[in-house]
Image: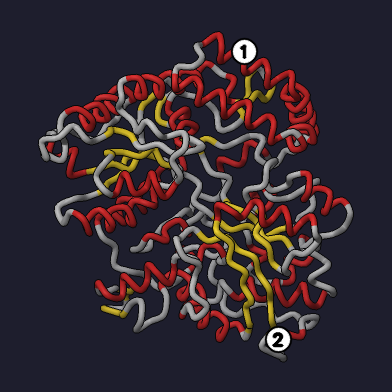
Amino acid sequence: MLNKKKRVKAGVCLTVLSLSLLSACGDATDTPAATGGAQNTNSPAASQGPATISFMLPYFSTEPPKADNPVFKKLEELTNTKMNITWVPNAAYKDKLSVSLASNDLPQVTVIANLDGGNYAPSILNGVRSGAFWEIGPMLKDYPNLSKLNKDVLENVSHDGKLYALYRPRVIARGGIIFRKDWLDALGLQEPKTIDELYNVLKAFTLNDPDKNGKNDTYGLISRKGIADLDMLSGFFGAGNGWELQDGKLVPSFTTKAYLDALKFYRRLFQEKLMNPDFAVSEGNQSKALFENGKGGAIISTAIDDVVGNDREIKKLNPNGAADIVSRIQGPKGERILASSGYNGIFMFPKKSIKTEAEMRAILAFFDKMFQPDIANLLNWGVEGKHYHLENGKAVSTESEQKLKVDDLLPVPQLSIVMNTDAPLEGVSTPLEQKLKTMFKENVSIAVPNPAASLISATLSEKSGELDKIRNDAKVKYILGEIDDNGWNSEIEKWRKSGGDQGIEEINAEYAKRKK
């Protein structure tokens, strides 16, 4: 099953929302928009209501979502539900989740994300093994839509072959490069198709005054804290997706020559001042602002669907500005994009907050109803007459509707388990949105999966904080020039001796069991 990750259903985002919430766009499940939600006789919510469900969700905007968000209000009406949502800033979500886990004070529906060790971090594993969370796998067959969720993605979020979670779907082939198209045009350059061409574009964006203001005040690349863009870039150089097979054994990709080649590329950019010098401490919103405010020309992105929002913000400052995307970069192993796991965070359901199976089934019924056509349309397009109107049977947004749509639908991906492919209502796409849609569809064929996506190592989970720090600090030191190749290899050896080698053995043992 592991090698099937790259075949996680390729429906992907066949239509793309015309707003910045495109982060909601995810891997297409096998789930058609069935009519009607689950009407399970064990659930009192079908005849009573509204049922109250408590949630804890992260948010990525500067302010928490409003309590009177019209999309959520309409969702409550259509599902006969009262949602009590605790919104937590994403930057603080890991700490809040850890405290809530330690105090056994989780709401009924909790997003599990950002914990050291991944979704099944030690604190979650302990809860699963002690029976603190509902196992929902056997229940899904009773729901017309949940029963059709993508089996490969469900495997990715399972533990020991059992399912304790619903996943928030995301696009499979979501990586690439977001760049300033107006800068590219001003310099007479073409979209980069190779690693060398990418370097030349970044150099020109830095040195050749792409904004024509007569000042040397731009950077070719904008990077950020955590440098997830480095991992995406490493795929262009031929590195695997977190893990890769070598001689029949799984090895961490960051230990490979291809990954070191990507590091050398980044170090060259830093040494030649072709990227923002504060990348190691720049938060996501800060790097986003640098790009949109005209200080940088490109972002190597794990989510190129951000381009629609980037383009809109750029045009606010410069009506002639424009963002664009490229995803296929030729490298030593051809064109490759590191695949996502098909999800971003999972919903888990603590038994302390959900006392009975009937309550658990009522919550599953709520999620199942999201696939009903009217609700799927709501979650993807918003409220008709407020966020869009119909023209020739298709959703169209005026400028004022678009602004409301961006604001009101931005938090929806944190709660929704449907994608725009599940919404029967079609919309009018801009050329940029159409290009994005086509990329998502075509790039599945070059998406490189993580062969260890559903494998768990007790050592790597328990020591994730220490091991991640060794690895991540070494990356930054290498880019800054504080260590050379020998220093990098020494840090890898330190990682191995600190538990990495034991973790590799455990991952391979689990991999061997799964192959049988």
Question: What percent of the width, then of the height, locates residue 147?
Answer: 68, 65
The mark lying in front, picked from 1 and 2, is 1
For residue 349, side relative to residue 206 (left or right): right
**Vertical order, 334 against 346 (above or below):** above
Q: What residue is shown with label 2?
A: 46
**Vertical order, 137 against 65 (above or below):** above
Colour scheme of the rendered structure: secondary structure
Sort mark 1 into few (<14), some (14-19) or many (20+) by Cα contacts within 10 Å. some
**Vertical order, 285 against 80 (above or below):** above
Question: What percent of the width, then of the height, locates residue 428?
Answer: 29, 67
For residue 370, which quarter of the picture? bottom right
Residue drawn at the location 79% of the way across and 70% of the way down? 353
Question: What percent of the width, then of the height, locates residue 216?
Answer: 18, 32
Quadrant into which the C terminus falls? top right
For residue 107, which quarter of the picture? bottom right
Residue drawn at the location 56% of the way across and 49% of the way down? 342
The mark that comes first in sequence, 1 or 2, is 2
**Vertical order, 168 against 192 (above or below):** below
Q: Amino acid at mark 1?
A: Ser
Query: What is the distance, in whole Å, between disc 1 and disc 2 at their CAs?
Result: 61 Å
